[in-house]
Structures are given as C-alpha cells and as structure tokens.
C-alpha cells in the first residue's frame, strides 16, 4: 500500500526530527528507514499516534533486564504519545509443543496464560505506563482460523525464505530436524500485525526475520506495511553470552533489591554503558557525560556501577529500596572483602591464648607494644570482626582468619 | 500399532498366496512387503475386506489410459472382495491455488466439484464395479480442522523429509520457489488415510512419498499403518514421456471408438505388453502367451496392437463398437497406407489420356495387355481409389498418385 506524501510545516519538521533522533537510542536497525520517517511524519501531521507492537511468550513470565530492552524503547514511544500494543502469544502457549520434545514450550491452561499475563502487566508496569498500553491475546484471531485460511496464509511465504531465518538455516544445514509446524510461528507473529494494523514492531536482533514477516503478510492482506525496529541482545553478567535464565547470567527484575544491586556490581566494566543505554531511562546526555568521565578517569567504574545498580533497584523496588541496597552493599560487601590468597599457618601452640601474644608469635606484629596499639586503633580483626578488647583470650579454631591493618591476613589451621 | 499374528489353516495359506500373487501384476513397489502380507492374512482369517484407497484430483476429470493403471489394480482388489475407497480431493479444489500462479489448480465451485466427481464415477464405472466403491470427499474432515489441529498435524513431519520429495528437492535445489502451503498437500493426503482407516493406498511411482505420508500420520494418530502400493507411470504414444493431456500423447477413455482404436495402433511395439498388463484386464496367462508369440514371430505386432485397440474400445464403448472400430480401421487406414518415398515424374504428355496408355508410357506396366489385366483385377488405383473402368480417360493433375499392385507407386507433377 502506498503511503501518502505530506507537506510539513517548519514546526512539524522540527517535531519529526526530534522524534527520529530520540528514538534512535540503542537501535540496531530500522527496516526500512524511509518508511519509518513517513510513519512519524504522518503521525505528526495527522496527530494520530502510531501503533507499536511488542510480542511476548506467555510461558516465561520471569522478566530479566535483558527482556526490558525493548520495553525501554516502548517507553520512549509512549513519551512521544504513541500507542503500545502488548501482544500475548497465548495461541501457541495453549497448543504447547505438539512434538512433545521441547521442555520450554509447555502447554498452558487458560488459567496459566491469564496468570502469566498478569505477571507481565505487573512487571512491565514498572517501566511502562500500563494505562496507555493495550493488551491483546492472539488466540482471539488465530484460534478461529480454519485449514483453508491457514493454507492461504502459508501461501505467502516460500520454504527457501523460511530457511533463511538464522536458526532454521543452522539447523537445516547441520541436519537437525525442523518440524513443519515450526514454520507457523513466524507466520502467526506476522499475522498478528495484520490483525492489529501494527505500524512498528519492536524486537531483538534475533527477531528481525519475524518482524519482516509481519511486513510481508500485511502487504499480502492489503494493509499498510509495518516497520521493523531491532535492538541489541544484552550480554549477561558473564559479559559474553546473551543474558538468559538458563545460563544463570541474568538480573531478574523481580529479585530482591540486594540481589539486583549485588548482581549489578558484577557487570563487566566494558558493558556498563550499554546497560545504561538499553536498560535504564537515564537521559542520553547524562549517559554521554558519564562515558566521558569514565574515559578520563574522573569517575571510578565501581561508582558508576553502584549508580547503575541503584537505578535498577529504584526502577523495580523504589527509591528507598535503592538507597538501602546501596548501604547494605557498602557495609556488608565492599568493607568485608577478603583477599582470596590468605597465607595459612598450622597453629600448634597453646589455646586459649592472649591476642597480643598470638599476633607476636605469628610474626604479624614485631612487638607486644605494637600489637597492643594496633588493637586499640581498631586495626585487628578475627573472622572479620574487630577486636575491641586488648585483653582478649583467643580460643584458636581451625580456619580462623586474623587480619592486621588493611592488608595483612593469616588463616590458622589446627 | 502392532498387528496381530495369525495362525492360518492350510486353506487360508493357499488363499493368501493366491491373493499376493494375483496382486503382484504390474506393481513397482509394495512398502513394506511384510505388512502387506499381514494385512492380507488378517483379511483372509477374519473375512473382513481391506480398505483400498485411491485419491483423485477433482479439477481434471478427463481420464486417459494412463489414469486407468491404478483403477485396474483396484479392480483386482475388488475381484478379491476388498473394499474400494475413492477419495475426491475436493478440499484443495475448493481452495484453488492461493498464490494464483498455477493454472492447473483452479478454484472450483461446489457445483463443479460435484459435476467432476460424477464424471469420474461414470468413467471409472467402465473399469470398476461402482456399486462396491465408496466415494469420499475430503473436505468433510479437512474443512473443519482449525489452526490448532493443523499445527499438530504439521508437527508430525520435518522440513528436511518434505524436501526429500522428488519434485520439492529438484525445485529447492534449482532455486525455484516452493510456497510453504505446498507442504500441506501431502499432509492432507496422509490425513485422509487417518480419517478413512485405509489399509492400502494405491498410486503411481510419483506418489510414493505421499503414500508413505499416510503411513507416518496414521502411526502418529495411533492407527494401523497403511501399505503403499506403487504402479508404473505409463509412457504416452510418443513412447518416451509419461502419458499426459498437455503432451498430447494420450488416449482418452471418453474419446470416440475410432479415435481410441486409431491411437492404439500408434503405441510403440515395445510398449504394447506394458499397456496390456497395466491398462487392460486380460488375464496374465494370456498376456504371457502373447509375449511369447510376439517374440517368436507367430503373432505380428500389428495384429497384437489391433487386439489391444479392440480391448480398449470394448472397455469404454462395448463389444460392438470395438468390432466396428476394427473394421473401420482396416478399411480406411490399413488399406490406405501410402509409402512416404513415392518417386515423382513430371508429366508433359497429353491429358486427358487413356489409363492403359498412361501406365505403359510411365513404364509402370510393360504392355497394354498387362495394364488392362491389372486394371480388371482391381490392381490399379488413382489417388487411392480403385480404377474400375478399363476405358477411363485420365485428367492428369499435379500431385496425382498412381498405384499398381501393392508396391508400385508414382506421383505425377505438372
């Protein structure tokens, strides 16, 4: 379907450019760019919001930071006044995996679908304004389709093009079986866009094929073609592989504040800015400034990471929880950090023994006077607990750790 | 599903062997042979007929001799008391080609489907006992299938196995598009066998893949698996390519008796026995005798072919028509046959001229007496018409053909 050309006022042109620039954040690809501009122009001129679709699998309602990347993009569309279509792919969920081979594609009851959808709404509500989101269940239009309709649907796609999809191609070439029904999943996703008159569909780079399927099918059904907008897949805490629950390299948005904060601290330095851009709503100018500050050393990566952790906790548990998590981390983790290469000494002397004698006999202090002063200054710890009493009689235990000052450690064995 | 083993009486064993031997006629492959035997055994022991399926395309009701090959096999099954399932594939006919590319796969109305089916019944009734044939329309069980059922159906087959089908493989490798919906056709055909509890499905060798699909799907749906019985594709009158309407190398069973007879006479000698075996019901012993007689020269191929033509006409138009066609052929065609290398002579003599003078001047007879006797004996023809009058004055015309006896010809030019 041809789109109309519009004549824009100067003001409208400025608005179009503003939206295009704002929506560029973190994007990998917009296919095709020209249609994207036309759609934004049309919306600006007519005042009608665009329809932005995001599909989700109803069988996996545990959302992690990786899943939130497209949500932040939707939030940006929301901020510009566009309309969000949240598509729950319940039709396939209700079927499950008909081959019975897939464990991840379990058959869901109506109740489970509904419960999972509610979980999404609750979790996504932390990023999106859910009052401005419409939720759709695709069984509404897929379930009533009859064999004849399915034949006509499938006629719009060739086998060769299906096998161009990355995962299909790999499996086909390596001789792994692809069931014929798997070809339906992209067709269903594309047909959802036909049913919903979607303008723009958002997804990870691994979704590009499916997003373009929507375009193809909309054209076949005489509708205006959607634009595909892809976003990066975020690496998990290992810094290498895509964040996923099965790889245990994820930060779940429903995890406890201290968990979220602590896991955030283990994000590799070089990925931090990517997380900021894709998984927070911090304005781009601030992220760019932070990037410069990190580059010239005026901000320490650890501090930047703490701020990121605090942003995550704030998003999912509120401001207060964020402050508490930061404090907890600082008191418990940051101050408690023990080196991993503590020297060991087998203790064969007496026990209990006066702490001052112990430090001198272990050569951790050169004199009793020095040892006494160190204790009085709070510089001596047993098992990470400060020794407050200079007269302390120590019951030596296997594995006991002594610390003198910041860097001197000794582990006792018996 | 496992089939029961039976203990057969001596008599039953003999009957099983009789059926197996009888049904071997012209068969290319039975897959698997062991199941075929088991099914026959079960039928002999229980007295229950087997269900033999033949599918047909409702869009092409013009039956030619090539189409009748499986019908003769069905007739043999009928003679053994088995039950014939004639399956009209009306479901796909009603859909047509959803891509609009195929001219042969036109969308049919209910009325057309019905009319074509009636044509089948009428035409097939010339070979089969239609009172013992049940006609099924697959839209009965395919039309009500919903998307969910289709997904489950398709889950039983892999893309790789689909692409092993000869025509798909060729098209895929040569880069010709295969629409995804084309994968449904073999699935539909296989599902028909599920719906009909078919025991044996009969088809040409090009149908093997589809016949085995029925087996696969029956197993998936917890049914007893059918056996695939394939038959040769018969070459057309050109002796090379499969008989087909589009190649114009066919004998249509609805053609006029003289057409059928005449076309039969142009069957290449080396294919005659194949036609006898596959497209007539002449008992095998007679065919084998004929084969021997042809080999030792005691029967002339022309006569064997005339008998074949007469058999065809008898099958489709009755005994009387067969005799008439044979006579017509003999009087009109056989006696009229002119050699292709007739010598030419430019006639510069007088015209009209007495026939006796003409023959002598052309050196076709050595004397007027000889010429006169030859005419009186009916041995002289002009333009294939016998010269009855010895006094005939001939008006010489360009292209006029003179014949004396069986082998002497002359063409006159002016």
Image (cartoon, coloured by chain):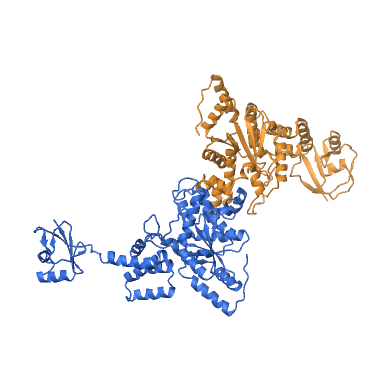
Chain colours: A orange, B blue
Residue found 38% across the figure and 59% down from its top: B255
Residue found 32% across the figure and 76% down from its top: B298
Quick check: B348 left or right of B132? left
**Outermost residue to the left:** B350
Task: Say which of B151 and B324 sits in front.
Answer: B324
Res. A177 in view: no
Q: Position of residue B98 (x, y in %)?
A: 50, 46
A376 relative to B280, above or below: above
Task: Say which of B256 and B64 sits in front.
Answer: B256
Task: Say which of B51 and A405 sits in front.
Answer: B51
Residue found 47% across the figure and 50% down from its top: B105
Quarter-wise, where is residue A69 in the image? top right
A138 relative to B71, above or below: above
Q: Position of residue B294 (x, y in %)?
A: 34, 74
Quarter-wise, where is residue A381 in the image? top right
Quick check: B97 left or right of A56? left
């Amino acid at each position: 379907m041809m789109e109309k050309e519009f004549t824009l006022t100067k003001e409208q042109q400025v608005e179009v450019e503003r939206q295009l620039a704002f929506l560029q954040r973190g994007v990998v690809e917009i296919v095709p760019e020209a249609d994207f501009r036309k759609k934004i122009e049309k919306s600006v001129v007519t005042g009608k919001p665009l329809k932005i679709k995001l599909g989700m699998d109803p069988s996996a309602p545990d959302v992690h930071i990786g899943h939130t990347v497209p949500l932040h993009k939707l939030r940006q569309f929301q901020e510009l006044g566009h309309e969000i279509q949240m598509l729950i792919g319940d039709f396939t969920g209700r079927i499950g995996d008909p081959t019975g081979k897939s464990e991840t594609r379990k058959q869901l009851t109506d109740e489970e679908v509904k419960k999972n959808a509610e979980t999404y709404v609750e979790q996504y509500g932390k990023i999106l304004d859910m009052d401005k989101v419409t939720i759709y269940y695709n069984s509404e239009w897929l379930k009533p389709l009859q064999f004849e309709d399915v034949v006509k649907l499938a006629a719009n796609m060739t086998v060769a093009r299906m096998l161009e999809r990355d995962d299909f191609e790999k499996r086909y070439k390596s001789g792994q079986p692809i069931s014929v029904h798997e070809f339906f999943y992209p067709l269903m996703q594309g047909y959802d866009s036909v049913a919903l008159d979607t303008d723009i569909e958002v997804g990870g780079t691994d979704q590009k094929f499916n997003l373009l399927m929507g375009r193809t099918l909309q054209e076949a059904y005489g509708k205006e073609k959607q634009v595909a907008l892809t976003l990066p897949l975020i690496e998990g805490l290992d810094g290498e592989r895509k964040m996923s629950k099965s790889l245990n390299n994820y930060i779940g948005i429903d995890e406890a504040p201290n968990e979220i904060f602590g896991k955030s601290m283990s994000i590799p330095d070089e990925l931090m800015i990517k997380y900021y851009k894709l998984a927070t709503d911090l304005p781009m100018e601030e992220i760019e400034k932070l990037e410069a500050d990190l580059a010239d050393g005026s901000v320490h990566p650890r501090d930047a990471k703490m701020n990121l952790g605090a942003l995550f906790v704030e998003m999912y548990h509120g401001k207060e929880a964020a402050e508490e998590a930061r404090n907890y981390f600082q008191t418990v983790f940051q101050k408690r950090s023990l080196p991993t290469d503590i020297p060991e000494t087998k203790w064969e002397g007496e026990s209990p023994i006066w702490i001052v004698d112990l430090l001198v006999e272990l050569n951790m202090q050169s004199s009793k006077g020095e040892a006494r002063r160190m204790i009085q200054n709070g510089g001596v710890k047993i098992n990470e607990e400060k020794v407050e009493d200079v007269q302390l009689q120590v019951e030596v235990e296997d594995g006991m750790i002594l610390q003198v000052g910041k860097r001197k450690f000794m582990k006792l064995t018996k």
